[in-house]
Image: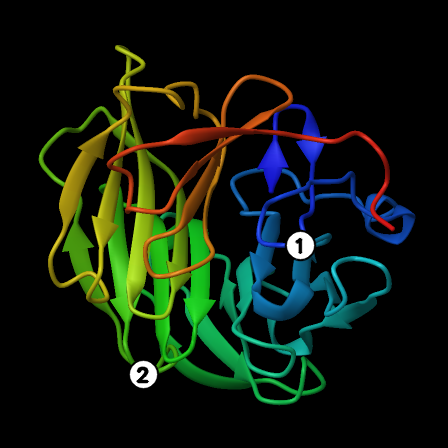
Amino acid sequence: MNTEAGEYISRDGGCTWYRPPTAMGLVSLASGYAPSLTFGPGGLVVILAGEDDFWVSDDGGRTGKTVKVPALAQDGITAVAFADARDGLVVGFSQCGSGEVLASKNGGASWHLVGQSGVMPISFAFDGPLAVAAGCPGNEISTSYDQGRSWYDLPLGSELTTSVVSVSVAGDSVAVLCYVIPSGREYMLFSANGGRQWAKLTFSGPGTKTVPGTLVLTGPRSVWAYGPPGILWHTTNAGRTWSAVRLLLPLAP
């Protein structure tokens, strides 16, 4: 979980949280609009560290490796996400438009072109076969149901002042955190069927301080978001109610 106070990791479904291992802390996050830090099932951690490479771990950040994507050495990587230790997608850089989507079936050892996304991702999530990219132009969501081969744009709405903060995917469930400028109002869009239908939920109780930050889906209706420093907010009913979970400071074992 990426928070204002730093990154935290849980290995027991969110009961306890720790600072990440030293190996993960040694990797520098990419700058700019790139979604630099993403998490996946089974202890997957992916850090976009450079223009054409990223760092990936399948043991919660204890150990990892640097993966390069030679095909994007010139254009650079905009986003990367893995569904498991072997299946991953990367999106090439573009000027607020569509970008090439490459897929790997062997943990990043090789890549091949599969499609072209409809947006430049500000946030990107993949839990094969469903992939979701949220970003510009127009603060849209671009969704793929076939592991990045074809994409369908789903506009977030007519509010030009709405900004996408983060997106997360678990199975068919999709959560999108949105921020309205300049009011500072935030809300979550939640879909239980891959983005075909959406529910708009406001943060009216605990957990209203969630921007800028991330949402992380860990189950069909389980979502994590961060609040004030030292606090995470958790919902098990797709955002209808939230509870507070305090973070621990020690390094992860």
Callout 1 touching callout 2 (CB < 8 Å): no
Colouring style: rainbow
> What amino acid type should be assigned to the residue bearing mark 2?
Asp
**Place of residue 115 in the rendered image (x, y in percent of width and height, measured from the top left):** 37, 79
Q: Quadrant of residue 129?
A: bottom left
> What amino acid type should be assigned to the residue bearing mark 1?
Leu
- Looking at the image, can residue 73 be seen? no
Residue at horizontal 67%, vertical 59%?
Answer: 45
Residue at horizontal 13%, vertical 63%?
Answer: 196
Which SS class for mark 2?
loop
CA distance separating discs 1 and 2: 24 Å
Q: Which residue is mark 2?
A: 146
Q: Quadrant of residue 3?
A: top right
**Place of residue 34 in the rendered image (x, y in percent of width and height, measured from the top left):** 54, 46
Residue at horizontal 30%, vertical 61%?
Answer: 173
Which SS class for mark 1?
strand
241 left or right of 13 in image = left
Q: Quadrant of the N terminus?
A: top right
- Looking at the image, can residue 241 be seen? yes
**Place of residue 181 in the rendered image (x, y in percent of width and height, measured from the top left):** 28, 17
Residue at horizontal 50%, vertical 78%?
Answer: 102
Q: Is residue 182 above or below residue 67?
A: above
Task: Determine which of the numbered discs, if any, sits on residue 48 in the image.
Answer: 1
Q: Nearer the viewer, mark 1 or mark 2?
A: 2
41 left or right of 168 in image = right
**Place of residue 18 in the rendered image (x, y in percent of width and height, measured from the top left):** 75, 40
Q: Earlier in the sequence, mark 1 or mark 2?
A: 1
Task: Determine which of the numbered discs, if any, sits on residue 231 in the image.
Answer: none
